[in-house]
Amino acid sequence: MSAFTTLPLTKSMIKNLNTMGYQEMTPVQAESLPHVLGGEDLLAQAKTGSGKTAAFGIGLLHNLDVKRFRVQTLVMCPTRELADQVAGELRRIARFKHNIKIVTICGGMPFLPQQISLEHQAHIVVGTPGRIEQHLNRGTMNLDNVTTLVLDEADRMLDIGFADSIDAILGYVPKRRQTLLFSATFPESILELSTRFQKNAQQVVVDIDHEENVIRQYFYESDWETKAEVVAQILGTVKPASALIFCNTKRQCRSLSTFLGEKGFSALAIHGDLEQKDRTEVLVRFSNGSTPILTATDVAARGLDISGLSAVINFDLPFESEVYVHRIGRTGRAGKEGMAFSLMTPKEGFRLKEINHMMGACFEVSDVKALEPSTNGSVLPPMVTLSINGGRKSKLRPGDILGALTKEGKIAGSCVGKINCFEFYSYVAIERCVADKAQEALSTKKIKGRHFIIHRHE
């Protein structure tokens, strides 16, 4: 791998990357960044978790003219969750220079606060196509000064019906610009999009396959009525530290999560019907370890970047073999061993044949009887999540919350887990053994000169 010091970046940028733990470039960063820094158009194939946000983020922030308070970069993402993650990563990278303003524009959130943020200008806008198009139609956002356009997970944006919105938005962006297009796959629709909106685009393709010896894969045959019970057996046998369970429908996500909860497992569901605050809370609780099991649809899980995911379970096999590869690729990352379990009805044997053909493998159906009988899964997660009714708009930062816990509450820093600060609320993961003490400290002590309401989630 190449070091970031080999790139023509400022000393302050390199120093900040070092503090973030970025010393060596991932393959997609090493292949993409020279083109991004050079102002070239780029068509890159890379999966979630490959470091692609930094691959475009470092370049666009390096090329940004901070003194020009106009929208210079527009980043489009398929989901609100991914947009939040991208904006958060860009803010971390942007610490190398003061006064860089990044605004997130997504549906499911109040329109007026976004309008006010845009009126005060921004350097970078990150958002979903639907809400971006709304702002453009109402004249509340100006893209006349955009020099860099990023389409992140473009294949998924087309899959969920944003093609017309993308076309409309591109009509507001100057034709002389840099266009960076990132996609997990290169179907004909993506190549056609690139042909229409990019000029002499450089192509980057990093290894998107997953080594079989890193991900142990198992397939179980089950009647539809007993599938949920088999999932409980898998969880009870393997006891993964974290598990992402894929369902093909929102209804199945909800019912499976409820079933597992009744079995004593700590599980949540994420799907398209959740309000934005609830979706954010679910993702926070899953990523910080306070709820180790998450049921999800492909669309809802898109953009999820959970490091160290122990297992993936396909409650439903996907309709396309490529989707299966993307799903299981969320475990077994960074050389760590992962596990993937898939359930299939007796009539779905052909799907296993398709997966074997695509992967050049010879997986067979495993015996369900080899799994432990389903037992009560009521092992409490080691972490508890506390929510605070204040965030960035209240000038709250992770350091303020950590200080209130360690200095005021006399809680060891090692007992404090991940802290997430959003615009209007924040979350902190606390070891269960000190959760009561932490909740009392945050409830009774002032943070940044004021009292906040604290809720416990478990």
Image (spheres, rainbow, N blue to C red):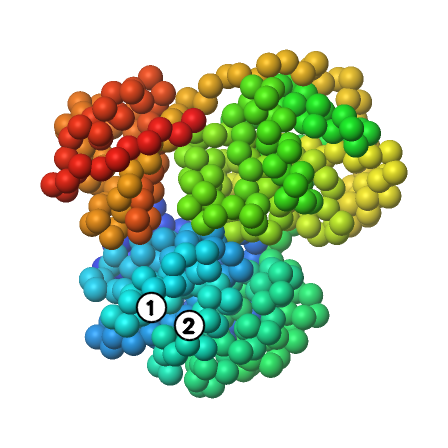
CB under 8 Å between discs 2 and 1? yes
Q: CA distance from mark 2 to mark 1?
A: 8 Å
Q: Position of residue 437 (x, y in %)?
A: 25, 20
The residue at which mark 1 appears reads as 115
Q: Identify the secondary structure beneath mark 2.
A: helix
Task: Give the camera-side residue of 13 and 169.
Answer: 169
Q: Residue furthest bottom?
A: 175
Q: Residue furthest left?
A: 449
Measured along the vertical axis of the image, is residue 222 above or below residue 87?
A: above
- Quarter residue 90 falls in: bottom left
x 45%, y 43%: residue? 278
> As shown in the figure, which amino acid type bears the numbered disc 2?
His
Q: Position of residue 225 (x, y in %)?
A: 78, 28
x 17%, y 23%: residue? 410
Q: Is residue 260 left or right of residue 114?
A: right
Q: Is residue 247 left or right of residue 33?
A: right
Q: Specify few, some or many for label 2: CA neighbours under 10 Å numbering under 14, 14-19, or 20 or more.
A: some
The residue at which mark 2 appears reads as 135
Measured along the vertical axis of the image, is residue 177 above or below residue 354?
A: below
Q: Is residue 346 left or right of residue 100?
A: right
User: Which of the two discs, 2 and 1, labels the residue nearer the N terminus?
Assistant: 1
What mark, if any, has residue 313 been given in the picture?
none
**Can the viewer see residue 387 in this picture?**
yes
